[in-house]
Amino acid sequence: MIKKFDFLVIGSGIAGMSFALKVAGKGKVALIAKTNLEEANTYFAQGGIASVTNLITDNFEKHIEDTMIAGDHLSDPRAVEMVVRNAPRQIMELIRWGVDFDKDDAGNFDLHREGGHSEFRILHHKDSTGAEIQASLIKAVHRHPNISIFENHFAIEILTQHHLGATVTRQTSGIECYGAYIMDIASGKIHTFLSKITLMATGGIGAVYQTTTNPLVATGDGIAMVYRAKGTVKDMEFVQFHPTALYHEGDRPSFLITEAMRGYGGTLRTLDGKEFMHRYDSRLSLAPRDIVARAIDNEMKLRGDDHVYLDVTHKDPGATRAHFPSIYKRCLDIGVDITRDYIPVAPAAHYLCGGILVDLDGRSSINRLYAAGECSCTGLHGGNRLASNSLIEAVVYADAAARHSASLIDSLTWQDDIPLWNYEGARASEEMVLITQSVKEVGQIMSTYVGIVRSNLRLQRAWQRLDINYEETEDLFKRSVASKDICELRNMINVGYLIMRQAIDRKESRGLHYTLDYPSSL
């Protein structure tokens, strides 16, 4: 079946939904959600959203400097300036859509401070800011008559000249996106969604790792699709590990203990109760995430421990429960009263700083294809994301992409001669078992060898083991009817290769130098 829309939005987090709301006045919008609208990385963002709002103590220059320092001065200054200076206006847009940020008794924003920030500038809704934003945007998109929502739909491939019989390589100029093949997961039918403009907003890659704070839908789908379509992908080696995920054996994903808890006064301790961050950074527990994550990882390896502790027992119990109700409840569920007990924490894959390369208008290297949110590489984050910069980046770039694409929409048409999906192929009964096992293997490979600490030997082992999974998965895809499980596994393996390849190409990642050769076929 062929469906036609002016705008096709693949992904239902803050980037996808805010873009949809901004362009819906210019045409019909299809909003694609892999599961339901609630299951997006945005929903799980606890800490908040960064913006300069208190001009008495804070200013744009401070926020810009904090972002550049956290990003190891690898950030694009133009992107940093754009996000920081446009943040307050986008905060007001979120409020107009119904987002309720906490305020103090005087009616001012109740601002938090997080690691790497020199000032209190984090707007929040208790410790469930992402859920508040997601819920408000969901209500707004449901109200808009021009937005059609497709839940439990999965994007398989974006459509380009390749689907018209042309040879498309990385050297091909003028590649264009005409929409995507989208699977209705309930029926297994694959529909052709034609669009004048497509936005990729599929989120991150955390589920590629065995231990992650991301929902398990975060398998890097958009990035892998764009890369296979010969689009440009950048900075994939910069995977940020959140230093403080709740350690509870068997949990996947891991429950996030927000950065704001360290800004609140939380102290990191080893299992014998001793502080250790003074040995790594003068900012102690408020150092940026990459420093804290490596410090925790080092302490765990030195001592042979599975986790460390985060201590807020010295803080007022009532204030702790009021500031962090979700964390208090989740920890209590596993027998930890955070007002009296130390919280067991360990690093987990959390955020990808790279992704689909876009310019200041959110345009990818493929014409008519934009990207925003975690699947994009804007240059804002550099080598390491500053806490709470991601949500504001997503909405600022969604706004830029909306303005630019809306200015073009009337001059564009649909590519009507795209062929329907070819359903040839047959699946064997044992394939699901193989796919499930391969997904687990990929997560273990990435966590063991391509995690916080990387080396030549670790990458060599990862590459060899991924090669086996790659060959098996490609064989399944070529001879089988496409399924969500096979496509997700392909995407995960593609992302794993990209992370390693771009680490090798850069020749260094956080101070380590690599000499490993990679297959020229990739």
Image (cartoon, rainbow, N blue to C red):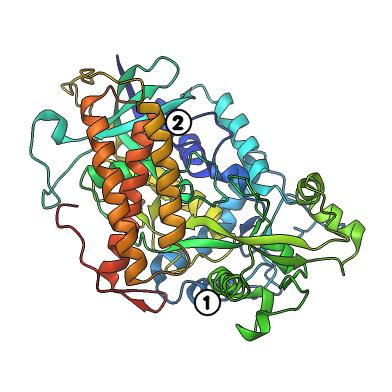
Q: Look at the image and tell me whether residue 302 can be seen.
A: yes
Label placed on residue 25: 2
Q: Label 2 is placed on what type of residue?
A: Gly
200 or 216, nearer to the observer: 216
234 or 446, nearer to the observer: 446
**518 on left or right of 8:** left
Q: Label 1 is placed on what type of residue?
A: Glu
Labelled pair 1, 2 in contact (Cβ < 8 Å)? no
**287 on left or right of 222:** right
Does residue 77 lie above or below 420 as drawn?
A: below
* SS at mark 2 in the image: helix
**Residue 339 percent across, percent down from the top left:** 87, 59
140 or 154, nearer to the observer: 154
* SS at mark 1 in the image: helix
**Residue 95 percent across, percent down from the top left:** 65, 45
**Residue 287 percent across, percent down from the top left:** 62, 75
The N terminus: image quadrant: top left
